Image (cartoon, rainbow, N blue to C red):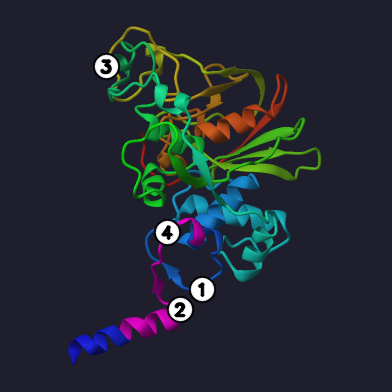
Amino acid sequence: MVRFLLVVAVALAFACGGTRAAKLDLDAVNQAQFSDGEPKGVDPMLLKAQILLDRARFSPGLIDGRLSDNFTKAVAAFQAANGLPSDGKLTRETWDKLAATFAGPVLTNYEIAAKDVRGPFTRHIPARMERMAHLKRLGYRNAWEELAERFHLSEQVLSQLNPKIGYRKAGTSLVVPDIGRGDPPARIESVEVDKASRQVRALDSSGKPIAVYPASIGSEEKPAPSGAAEVRRVVHNPTYRYNPKFAFKGVKTKRPFTIAKGPNNPVGSVWIDLSIESYGIHGTPDPGKIGTTFSHGCIRLTNWDAEDLAGMVKPGTKVDFKDETAQDGQAQ
């Protein structure tokens, strides 16, 4: 009898908009519709919403199908840009506006190409920066990491969408997000770095956001700068040069060193150099930490968001830093 009552209670919880758990596959995500129920774990509706936000350049950061601060901020930015109350809650009205931005399926099939599995890969990357300097390249660790980043997705969710994929070889078909953002605008007027909200915005001449990205921005140890700056240059696939005067926590050497290029380089796959010495906007080897941890003073985005922004800026593009009022998080 107790077991029967428990089953009934669970059923009533779902009927009354309680927590929900759903199967995660291509059809479930593509056909997902708005629901008021509280998501449990990786949710098809949230995954679809994140992909739509990513496509619209209101980036949720790493697409993982879960509720997060980055997702809430992306929703709020999308709401503000579309004349809706910007509380960050995925309401039915917000869902309808978001769904109207793209009529196609958000998940599609991708066939693994030979170049995807060819490498070269860097299978073992040390945690300490001094030891990274001994490597010839900071490449992806494996093809799965490379494919997950290409589609802006966590490796875990990529595996959940493709549970029967064992050995990843050329010719294998994968279910992946359709993250086609389209060509970036020919030019933007300025970039805004908002320390309080931990966001970077690309703005047009009227001050309207063209793109909004979650960011890790400075720390108590090395805060981000204030005031105005401008872009000096964009460097794709950069090396990283450590200067002992930075005195980063955990780096013990007193000598300068250089870390080779590659997407797992400390500054990721692109460096947007700013007119303030030693500061820039750049990518990261750990997209899951964007917006939830601090940086070493610079402005850190996911590799794909940094590359997207790099395609919009040019030497002389203005960069304005909005000072923060409060900041939470864990120094890194």
Amino acid type indicated by mark 3: Lys
Residue 220 location (% of width, % of height): 41, 34
Amino acid type indicated by mark 1: Asp
* Residue beneath disc 1: 36
Q: Is residue 96 above or below residue 183?
A: below
How many angstroms separate mark 1 from mark 2 (CA)?
A: 6 Å
Horizontally, is 26 left or right of 331 in the view?
Answer: right
Q: Is residue 18 magenta?
A: yes
Which circle marks residue 24 in the picture?
4
Residue 84 location (% of width, % of height): 69, 63
Answer few, some or many: residues within 10 Å of disc 2's Cα (few below 14, many 20 plus, some between 14 and 19).
few
* Residue beneath disc 3: 252
How many angstroms separate mark 2 from mark 4 (CA)?
A: 19 Å
Which circle marks residue 272 in the picture?
none
Disc 4 secondary structure class: loop
Pick the residue in front: 311 or 245. 311
Pick the residue in front: 322 or 240. 240
Q: Residue at x 66, y 65 (%)?
A: 96
Q: Is residue 237 magenta?
A: no
Q: Which of the 4 image quarters holds residue 91?
A: bottom right
Q: Which of the 4 image quarters holds residue 93?
A: bottom right
Camera-side mark, 3 or 4:
4
Mark 1 or mark 3: name the one nearer the start of the chain: 1
